[in-house]
Image (cartoon, helix red, strand yellow):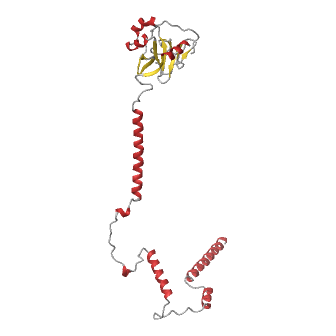
Amino acid sequence: MEIAIGIVVVLGFGALALFATARGRAATGRLSRETRRADSSQPPPEAVPDAGSAIEPADEAARERAAQSRRAAEGGSLVPAGERGVVRYEPVDLDELGVTRRQFFNRGILATLGLSVGTFGVASIAFLWPGKGGGFGDKALNIGSVDDVEKSIAQKKPYYNASGRTYVQPYPTTALKGAEKAYDSRLLTGMKEGYVALYQKCPHLGCRVPWCDSSQWFECPCHGSKYNRVGEKKGGPAPRGMDRFAFSVIDNALVVDTSTPIQGPPIGTDTTGQGQEGAPCV
């Protein structure tokens, strides 16, 4: 019984929904009662003037402007169709046109690039061009007078010239016989003058070797290599003694050839016999 009542209720709701839908479809396209009442209350439209009646000039001008605007919006021409003709191409005069924007930027970029490359090239040539002298690498570098060298030696310190990267130390004339056997012949001229010119760079790994006042030796702080007063190796990992330069005394001045360092004496060379004279610095 309950099932039957439920079926009847469902069928009733379905019938109501179907009736409402059909009524809505039937009313589609019809004016509502309120719309018909509003239309009947409006005054009748004005009569359209006959084709032969006069049109105000202002209205005609407005219509023409509207027509032109419409043609322009649609991509047409503002020129009336009767006045249109074939457009003849006239070549552009380059003198009248001048420099275009593209040409201006292209020429500017090329000019900037050329200036940059040219400046870099000139700087590179200037860097690689050999100097006129006066610094390290010069074949005839004046590093000071004999008086300056002697003044420094009197204080038990080597004479040092920064531009030549050179230490100058005294070499005893009593050791010349041993030097003739142990050293390059190019160095003997300076030794006979009583001096030796030592390159400041350690032969081990290139550190600058300072002078130790207490031991009276050159002692490298990087890895502990030690050299006596004239640069002969006394200890440490260095493969040889300190490298040196050939020089000569000209007009009371020491003129050193710093262009070609000469390798120092081999391990075991000890022409002066000078030992450590105090506490080491390294």
Left or right, 37 with reference to 128 = right
Query: In the rendered image, which quarter is residue 276 located in?
Result: top right
Q: How many marks?
A: 0
Query: Is residue 150 positioned above or below 97 on the image?
Result: above
Of 178 and 172, which appears nearest the observer?
172
Query: In the rendered image, which quarter is residue 253 located in?
Result: top left
Determine the residue located farthest toward the front in the rendered image.
251
Residue 230, image x, y percentages: 48, 12
Residue 1, image x, y percentages: 66, 72
Left or right, 94 with reference to 244 = left
- Give the residue displayed 40% in from the left and 39% down from the top: 122
Residue 211, image x, y percentages: 54, 16
- Give the residue displayed 42% in from the left and 13% down from the top: 190
Of 114 and 23, which appears nearest the observer?
114
Q: Is residue 10 visible?
A: yes
Determine the residue located farthest toward the right in the rendered image.
2
Query: In the rendered image, which quarter is residue 141 located in?
Result: top left
- Give the residue displayed 42% in from the left and 52% down from the top: 108
Residue 160, image x, y percentages: 51, 19
**Image quadrant containing the C terminus:** top right
